Image (cartoon, rainbow, N blue to C red):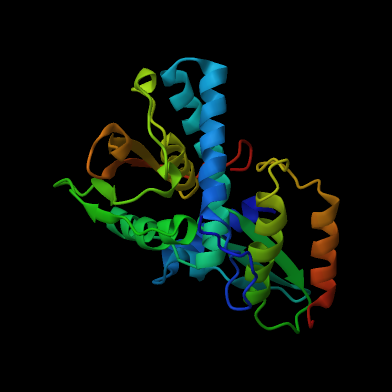
Amino acid sequence: MYWYLPFISPSASMHLMSSELFTLTYGALVTQLCKDYENDEDVNKQLDKMGYNIGVRLIEDFLARSNVGRCHDFRETADVIAKVAFKMYLGITPSITNWSPAGDEFSLILENNPLVDFVELPDNHSSLIYSNLLCGVLRGALEMVQMAVDVKFVQDTLKGDSVTEIRMKFIRRIEDNLPVGEE
Amino acid sequence: MFGMLFSIRSFVAKMSPVDMRDGFLCFQTSKYKLHYYETPTGLRFVLTTDLGVGSARDALQHLYSNIYVGLGVKNPLCPLGEPVQSELFRSRLDAFVRALPF
């Protein structure tokens, strides 16, 4: 077993922690949800909801730490997500491919997914989207920066595909609403 | 105060050649200076100071990254859209503002 010793480096603000602990924690979470909800669709929805709640807070932490400014278009957003955000939080850099002609949809290809280390899906959970938390996180985070997006898994190594592919589609820009009575 | 800030912000956005977030930094009257910092997520930080102060932008940024994110955001019991109730947040904020060089 490979352990990262936790330490606080003066130059980095991130503590390194054991990736096994993270994988095990996520696995325990999904297992418990499967027991609580009994059907895969409900578990998927819960994972998405939890991911959303994480995402709306994670974006603040991300902006505070990475200091990136507002992105001017969806391509810049895709770059920031793949090269900065994924690297910062999961330690991987997915590649960006399959841009739609209108430039409003793209795919993130993850060669390895730290959430699913050592995981195998049993046959009775074939419609479970194990890493659906990630979709919720991306959706919640982007909503806080005024972008409504649709995020879903189109390929999953857990289901026998060679890579994991997440498809992200830009739906619309969310306008700032003035609170009622402030006009 | 929100209405006034929003109007100033829209005004600056129309006039400024730079990205709007860097546009509205501060304004001053004969009595005080108001510093403004806005994040892409729509959070707005306002600091009023005496006229003698230069740019408080770094201080506001530090406030955001360390105090707000560290305590408000990362604390899952802290609801996001409402006024902050946390005592720890108040005391850290207080200590930070008192420690500023101006």
Where residue A50 sits, quadrant-wise, is top right
Is residue B39 depicted above or below A177 in this figure? below
Q: Position of residue B31 (x, y in %)?
A: 78, 74
Query: Which residue sits at x=41%, y=71%?
Result: B18
Q: Position of residue B9 (x, y in %)?
A: 54, 60
- Locate residue B97 relative to residue B34 in the image: left or right: right
Is residue A176 depicted above or below A14 in this figure? above
- Farthest left residue in view: A101
Q: Of residues A20 and A138, which is closer to you in this image?
A: A20
Q: Position of residue A31 (x, y in %)?
A: 52, 28
Q: Of residues A158 and A144, which is closer to you in this image?
A: A158
Where residue B47 sits, quadrant-wise, is bottom right
Q: How many marks?
A: 0
Check the picture and name the quadrant holding the C terminus of chain B.
Answer: bottom right
- Farthest top residue in view: A38
Visible residue check, residue B41 = no
Query: Which residue sits at x=68%, y=65%?
Result: B66
Query: Which residue sits at x=37%, y=60%?
Result: A80
Where residue A116 sits, quadrant-wise, is top left
- Farthest front residue in view: A1
Visible residue check, residue A62 = yes
- Locate residue B54 relative to residue A124 in the image: left or right: right
Q: Position of residue B84 (x, y in %)?
A: 76, 47
- Locate residue B12 relative to residue A159 in the image: left or right: right
Check the picture and name the quadrant holding the N terminus of chain B.
Answer: bottom right
